[in-house]
Image: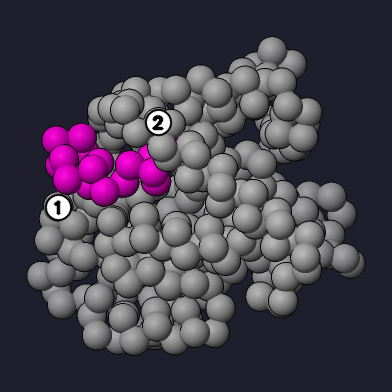
Amino acid sequence: MTRATRMQRLQFAVEMAAVRVATVLTAPLSDAALISLAGRIGRLIGRYVPAARKRVEANLKLVRPDLTAAERAEIAAEAGASMCMWGAEYMRLASLAADPSLRHVEGGEHVRAAREAGRPILFVTAHFGGWEFVRLAARDLGVETGILYRAFNNPDFDAHAQTLIKAAGEPVMHKGRQGSRALLRLIGKGGAAMILVDQRQTGAPLAPFLGRSAETSTAVAELAKRSGAALIPACAVRVQPGAEYHVRFEAPVEVGDPLAAMAEVNARIGAWVEGRPGQWFWMHRRWRLSAGVTAPEDA
C-alpha cells in the first residue's frame, strides 16, 4: 500500500474508533442477537442508502431483467442485511467457531476423499452467506484451512481483522506476491486454503456468470492443475443467522482447461446465488469489462 495522506490517516483513525465503540456497545448482546441486529440495520442500508441500492439494482437489471422493481428492492434490502451480518459474524467469529452445533454439513465425503487420497485442497467460494463457516466446517472434519484475501485499505483495521479471521483457520494470507508464495508453500505441503473467486479480475479471460460474460481469474484452477489439489466449491447458507448455517461441500471440479474449470465454478456459484439471491454481495462491479473488451452477447 502507498503511504497514506494525512486525510487518509484521519479517516483510518475514525474507522478504528468506530470499530472499538461498536465492539464495546454490542458486548452485552449474544451472538445471535448481534447478528440479528446487524441484519436489521443492513436491510435499511440496502433499501434506503442510494449508493448501495443503485449498485445492486443495476446488477440485477443486467442479469435478471425479468424482476419487478419491488423484487429488486427486496433483494437489495436482503443483500444489505447479509453484508452487515457478515461484519457481525467476524466480530464474534471466535465464539461462533467454538460451537460446531451451528454448522450442518453436507458433502463432507468430498473433503474426506481428498484427504484420504493425500491431496491438497482448494476450497472455492464467494461473498455469499456466512462464508467463513466453510473453513469452520472443514476444521470440524479435521482439515485446518487457511485463507487468501484482499487486504483492507485501512492497515490498522486490516491488522485487527487478521486477529478475527484467524479464528476460522490459519494461515491468513494477503492477495499479492507474498500471499501467493505462501499459498504455494501451503498447497505444496498438502495443506488446504479457501479463496473467494467471485470478484472481477481486471484483464482476466471471460467466462459466463449468471448468464453474462465476466472477467474471471483462472489462477486457482491453474494452481489446482499444477499441484493436483482438489478444487472443491463450498458455500455456507444462513438458515438462522447466529444459530444455524448449512455448509455444503460440492463434488470437486475436474481441471483440464483452467478456463473451462472456472466456468464450471462460476456455474456452481451462480446456482447458489439463484437459490438465495439476497445472500450474495451484489455490490461488486462483477460484469464491468476492461477497455476494449466486448462480451460475446453484446457483439
Tell me what residue is drawn at x 71 percent, y 77 percent. 2
Residue under pointer 2: 26
Labels 1 and 2 touching (C-beta < 8 A) = no
Residue 287 vertical placement versus 220 (above, below): above
Q: Residue at x 54, y 63 (%)?
A: 156
Q: Position of residue 99 (x, y in %)?
A: 16, 40
Q: In which image quadrant can residue 60 be found?
A: top right
Magenta-drawn stretch contains 285: no
Instruction: Choose between 174 and 222: the one closer to the eye.
Output: 174
Query: What type is the residue that disc 1 sits on?
Result: Asp
Q: Is residue 277 visible?
A: no
Percent of width and height locating residue 249: 28, 50
Give the answer, above or below, for where 297 lies relative to 183: above
Taking 195 as reference, is 247 above or below it? Answer: above
Magenta residues span 88-103
Give the CA distance from mark 1 to mark 2: 28 Å
Residue 279 on image: x %, y %:
49, 33
Say which element carries label 2: helix
Residue 94 lies in magenta, yes or no?
yes
Vertically, is 37 above or below 96?
above
Left or right: 298, with 26 as reference point: right
